[in-house]
Image (cartoon, helix red, strand yellow):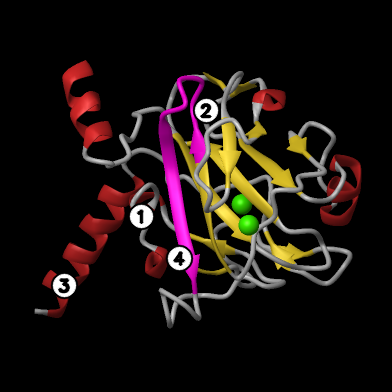
Amino acid sequence: MKRTLAIAAAAGVAAVATADIRITEWMYDGTGGEFVEFTNIGTSPIDLTGWSFDDDSRVAGTVSLSGFGVVAPGESVILTEFSADAFRTNWSLAASVKVIGNNTTNLGRNDEINIFDASNTLVDRLSYGDSTFAPGSIRTQGTSGNAFLADLGTNNVYAWFFSAPGDLFGSSFSNAGTFGNPGFYYIPAPGALALAGLATLAAGRRRR
Ligand SMILES: [Ca+2]
Ligand SMILES: [Ca+2]
């Protein structure tokens, strides 16, 4: 394992940790305050003490995420340029939703979201830029972007789509008129996808 990491580092390839924290939503600009959402998609609590965020400069330790503390399975937490209280008020979030506010390492139209664990190892990355290097991908200005579970952690911005009324993520308008679903991520129940697959298969058989 150590040898693998050393080889990856020597090759300039970012090693990706196995911790189950993923980038699950982002809005790079908006009067509701730009934000990034991280979710524990695993089945065990994860302590984010010592973890950090950076944008496209990719420097571990730039913005501390220690304030999130232990993130429970399924829990979504928020990093935003607003104050934490203003953000919760804007999106009508409960006080229990963890928000780290006043982030000054802001996101631009073409930028990157990086999270690092306490060992400064990259855990997840999303590179985006609808105009520069990913033409045709979404521009999350005032409306956030989401991706489904299977597409998380792949750094494929084309798998991301706009929050929409009635979606599985419970999207709604903020007081400022921006649209998204900070504080919640939709994780299908175990077996739900398999059941959906079987239903599709059965429907196909009936058609035949
Ligand atoms: Ca930036
Ligand atoms: Ca969300």
CA separation, marks 4 and 1? 8 Å
Q: Can the viewer see residue 126 in this picture?
A: yes
CA separation, marks 4 and 3? 28 Å
- Label 4–label 1 contact, CB within 8 A: yes
Quick check: 35 above or below 119? below
Question: Is residue 30 found left or right of 162 in the rendered image?
Answer: right
- Label 4–label 3 contact, CB within 8 A: no
Cβ at disc 3 under 8 Å from ligand 2: no
**Principal SS element in the magenta part?**
strand
Q: Residue 160 carries which label?
A: 4
Span highlighted in magenta in the image = 115-129
Q: Does the magenta stretch include residue 173?
A: no
- Label 3–label 2 contact, CB within 8 A: no
**Label 1's element?**
helix
Q: Residue 38, percent across and down?
A: 57, 41
Q: Residues within 10 Å of mark 4 (few under 14, many from 20)?
A: many
The residue to which callout 1 is attached is: 151
Quick check: 18 above or below 106? above
Q: Earlier in the sequence, mark 1 or mark 2?
A: 2
**Label 4's element?**
loop
Q: Quadrant of the N terminus?
A: top left
Dividing the image into four quarters, tell me where ligand 1 lies.
Answer: bottom right
The residue to which callout 2 is attached is: 73
Q: Which mark is residue 204?
A: 3
Q: Residue 171, percent across and down?
A: 66, 62
Q: Which of 127 and 44 lies nearest the eye of the viewer? A: 127
Quick check: 135 above or below 178? below
CA separation, marks 4 and 2? 22 Å
Residue type at mark 3 is: Gly
CA separation, marks 1 and 2? 18 Å
